[in-house]
Image (cartoon, rainbow, N blue to C red):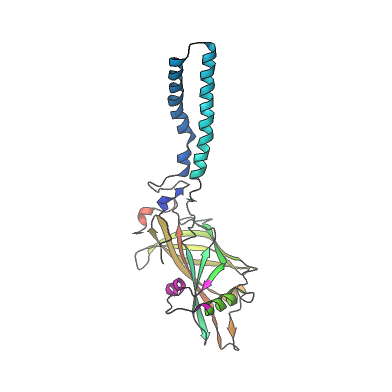
Amino acid sequence: MEQNSLPNLAEFSFIGSTDLGSVPALHSQCDSRQFHRTMPAILPSKISKDADMRCSHSYLTRINVVATIALAWIIFASIAPVACSQDATTPSYKPGDVQTQASRVYVFVDKTGLGHQHGVEAKLLSSRLELGADQNAGKLTFDMNSFDADTQAARKYVGLQGTTDEGTRSAVNNNMKGSAILNVAQYPTATFDVASAIATGQTGSDGLPIYELKGNFTLHGTTHPLEFSVEVEQTRGWLHVRGNFVIKQTSFGITPYSKAFGAIGVADSLKIYGDLFVAPTANVAMSDIPTRQ
């Protein structure tokens, strides 16, 4: 897929304990202990030296110096949190967070009769995937309202030739997301609750390590167990996770689209592809994951 929208992970603040080399942690920029170590040696000495040069050793002068020091500390302490809050506006990722702007879901929809094959592109809402975890390995949330039929990216990803005109795309989207099929008004999300995401110790044909994901997939208000394999590589500091699985629409209470007494329609089986970018976790040895620049 196109990766122009994928930022380098090192450009973002990273919260959590994992081996990311030079990636800075946001909290290190606002370390109050460092502030206390350095400021007393700088601020009081300068103020005291200036006071000794200008003022007598009267009791009143000493009180003024102490008051000046206290005021300077108050002013500096009020500025420091502002600087930290500005840094906090930079996007932050925890280990296992999915980068939803670049990650995509694609669906291959086959035809029946005189129907047409389709490729569908979709996005994820806030999601997590902790590769290497043998329990509570995350949750992927599919934004059903984002499902978009026959985008150029989707057709290319699922291996379809040619393009689809906007009028046809609009009609397909309306049918797909309407009450008779996905019914996104009632079911705006689908979810994959990932119970485990364990390395199999095997590699794919291209040499990438294979992980096995197991959990429960919920679509259209119906839940079924699901397990499938994914391959993993490094891209710009992220774990690039790709895999696919097949479901039947009827298993989730969905009647596949058809018209003309079944002469035109789509197949019951759907092949769903995940193409995700995930922040690394301590469960994965990054040295074991091949890198693509």
- Point out residue 58 in the picture as x, y percentages from the top left corner: 51, 10
Spot the residue most to the front: 54
Q: 130 or 260: which is nearer to us?
A: 260
Where is residue 189 drawn, in percent x and y?
A: 59, 65
Bounds of the magenta span? 148-166
How many numbered marks are there? 0
- In this picture, is 273 found above or below 171? above
Residue 216 in sight from this viewpoint:
no
Q: Quick check: can you spot residue 238?
A: yes
**Seen in the image, is 240 located left or right of residue 255?**
left
Answer above or below: position of 38 versus 271.
above
Q: Position of residue 44 (x, y in %)?
A: 46, 23
Magenta-drawn stretch contains 151:
yes
The quadrant holding residue 8 is: bottom left
Membership of 93 in magenta stretch: no
**At 53% from the left edge and 67% from the top edge, which residue is drawn?**
226
Residue 159 shown left or right of residue 269 in the figure: left
Work out whether residue 154 or residue 131 is closer to the camera in this orientation and state it.
Answer: 154
Q: Nearer the viewer, residue 240 or 7?
A: 7
Q: Which of 254 and 188 is in front in this view?
A: 188
The quadrant the N terminus occupies is: bottom left
